[in-house]
Image (cartoon, rainbow, N blue to C red):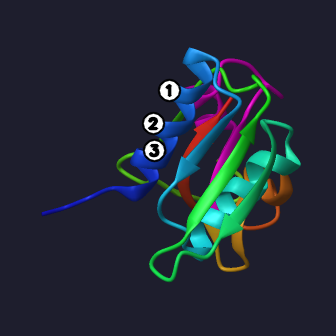
Amino acid sequence: MMHNIIADIMTVLRNAERVGKKTCRINHASSMIKSIVEIFKKNGYIAGYKVIDDKKAGIIEIELNGMINDCKPISPRHSVKKEDYMRFEKRYLPASNMGVMIVSTSQGIKSHNEVKGKIGGTLIAYVY
């Protein structure tokens, strides 16, 4: 059975924002998920987060601040060259300089604004 954890996390965040919750919990605290949540925090989409060790997969408790309009995984994941970010910005984000695409690169998981014009990677998700 295939299971997309990134899609589950984006759904939890989006639904919690839509109903006006102040916090939400993600029941899977992998390093990739922590990196994605850190990018959300750096760009102001969440107020903060803390990782709770439950002796299993871990829990991430996220403080929401009402800034997420939409966040979704990008499926199928597209490989992007360093000069092609603008094309995918037009496809996934509502306007130029509005929102963030999350990219898996050889240097780790970064926002597209950090790596635009420097290195390519694989698109994972977007938020605006």
Q: Residue at x 54, y 73 (%)?
A: 30
Query: Which of the 4 quarters of the picture holds residue 49?
Result: bottom right
Q: Helix, strand or loop at disc 3?
A: loop
Q: Are marks 3 and 2 in contact (CB under 8 Å)?
A: no
The percent coordinates of residue 88 (x first, y second) are: 59, 38
* Marks 3/1: CA–CA distance: 18 Å
Residue 36 appears at what percent x and percent y?
A: 66, 57
In the image, taking residue 31 as reference, residue 72 lies left or right, namely left
Looking at this view, name the residue that lies furthest to the front.
54
Kindly state the secondary structure of the residue where label 1 is placed.
helix
Looking at the rendering, the stretch of residues picked out in magenta corresponds to 85-103
Task: Say which quadrant the N terminus sits in.
Answer: bottom left
Q: Is residue 63 in the magenta section?
A: no
From where the camera sits, is residue 29 visible? yes
Q: Inspect the image, locate mark 1, and give the three-letter code of the amino acid beneath it.
A: Asn
Q: Position of residue 39 (x, y in %)?
A: 76, 53
First of labels 3, 1 by sequence position: 1
Q: CA distance from mark 1 to mark 2?
A: 6 Å
The part of the image, by quadrant, that contains residue 38 is: bottom right
Q: Nearer the viewer, residue 82 or 47?
A: 47
Residue 91 in magenta?
A: yes
Residue that badge 2 annotates: 11
Q: Which mark is residue 74?
A: 3
